[in-house]
Every structure is written in C-alpha cells, then in structure tokens.
Amino acid sequence: MNVPQAKTTIADYLDYERASTERHQFVDGEIFAMAGESLEHSTISANIIISLGLQLRGKPCRVLSPNMKIRSGPVEAHGTKGLFSYADASVVCGEPRFHDTHKDILLNPKLIVEVLSPSTEAFDRGDKFLRYSTFLDSFTDYLLVSTIEPRLEHFTKQTPNQWVYTCISGLDACLSLPNLGCQLELAEVFDGVEFEA
C-alpha cells in the first residue's frame, strides 16, 4: 500500500523557493521545477517584453519579466491550496500589490502572457486560466502565444464571469490591447523566429 505524501505548505514552499537558484511552481501543495525554454520560446518572450515595455514607458503600467511570481488562490500561509506561478510576461498598472514584504509575488497583474509549450499548454489554457480569472480581481487580459505559427490568442474580461476570445494569425496582423493602450504587431512578436514549413 502506498502511503500518501504530505502536501507542502505555502510557507514551506516560499522558504524553499527563495533559497533556490532554480524556479519552481506551487500547485495545491505540490512543487514543480520549471523546465528550460526553447530558443523560439525565449525569443518570443523577449520580443513581447520589449514591445510592451516601450509602449508603456511614461504610463502608469509596467511590464514585468518572467522572474516575478504571481499568486492566485486563497491566502493561507500554512495551507496547501493555491497557485504560485511564473508567467512569461505580465503587466501591472498602478501600485503593485505583493504577497509579503519580500515583494517577489505579485497580486494584481492586469495582463498575463503565456508562451505555449507542449508540456504546459493544457494547464495554461485550463486550470491556470481558471485560477487567474477566479482569484485576480485586477486581471483583464490573458495572452496565449504560439511557438509553432505566428498566432496570438487573447482573452479580454468583459464582466467577472464573461471573457471575449480573439485569435489572430499571420505576420501582417496586429493585436490591439485597449485595456493597456497598446498593440502587438505579430511581425515584431515573432521577429527572429523560424517556423517549420
């Protein structure tokens, strides 16, 4: 008979994560090491951060790198429920709010960007989006980015329970992000990325 392993508490995860040289996600008491990323994935993430960063300069919003954790879940330091994750990019508007005084876990992202990988796509599209949309009041825009073709999928919050889906593709296309006053030219997002025929 297998003995169930005890779940890790949020407090223990944060102690472990802050002492680690690698990044780990926390999902309901389980810790998962973050895998490395492909050249395409890394290039796309950097392109989006550069584009958004330039457009947001001088505005009350800022783009954050993939090293900023995002918490989506109940607030129970000694509990095991919740998600602490790393997005490929995020945008916060106004004063950032944090989980604690370390200021390394954001509570109020407006935009979250996930560059899709085969190993994480189902989670990014499903449970992760559900947790983000349930627990993050500030969250209005979710962007899923393909690495196999020039395609962006954008979810925009209309009401607490309604999101509008937009999908655009092709290097001549442009995605408008009205909540941020920005746009993403797909030619810029996918600059330097070679797609298989």
Image: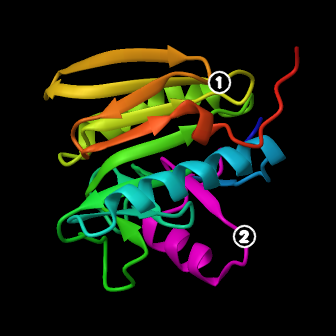
The residue carrying pointer 2 sits among few (fewer than 14), some (14 to 19) or many (20 or more) residues within 10 Å by Cα, namely few
Question: Which three-letter amino acid code belongs to the residue tagged 2?
Answer: Glu
Residue 144 in percent (x, y) is at 51, 31
Q: Which residues are magenta?
A: 4-29
Residue 87 in percent (x, y) is at 52, 51
Viewport quadrant of the C terminus: top right
Q: What kind of element bears circle 2? A: loop
The answer to the question of whether label 2 and label 1 lie on touching residues, with beta carbons closer than 8 A, is no
Residue 22: image tag = 2
Residue 13: image tag = none
From the viewer's perspective, tell me whether residue 136 is left or right of residue 77.
Answer: left
Q: Is residue 25 magenta?
A: yes
Q: Residue furthest left?
A: 159
Residue 183 found in image quarter: top left
How are the residues colored? Answer: rainbow
Which residue lies at the image location 41% right of the left edge and 28% below the top edge? 175
Q: Foreground: 35 or 40?
A: 40
Residue 150: image tag = 1
Which residue lies at the image location 22% right of the left edge and 29% below the top edge? 157
Question: Which three-letter amino acid code belongs to the residue tagged 1?
Answer: Pro
Residue 67 found in image quarter: bottom right
Q: Is residue 125 magenta?
A: no
Q: Residue furthest front?
A: 172
Viewport quadrant of the N terminus: top right
Residue 65 in percent (x, y) is at 52, 64
Q: Which of pointers 2 and 1 lies earlier in the amino acid sequence?
A: 2
Q: Is residue 112 above or below residue 53?
A: above
Residue 38 visible in rendering: no
Q: Foreground: 176 or 36?
A: 176
Q: Is residue 163 above or below residue 17?
A: above
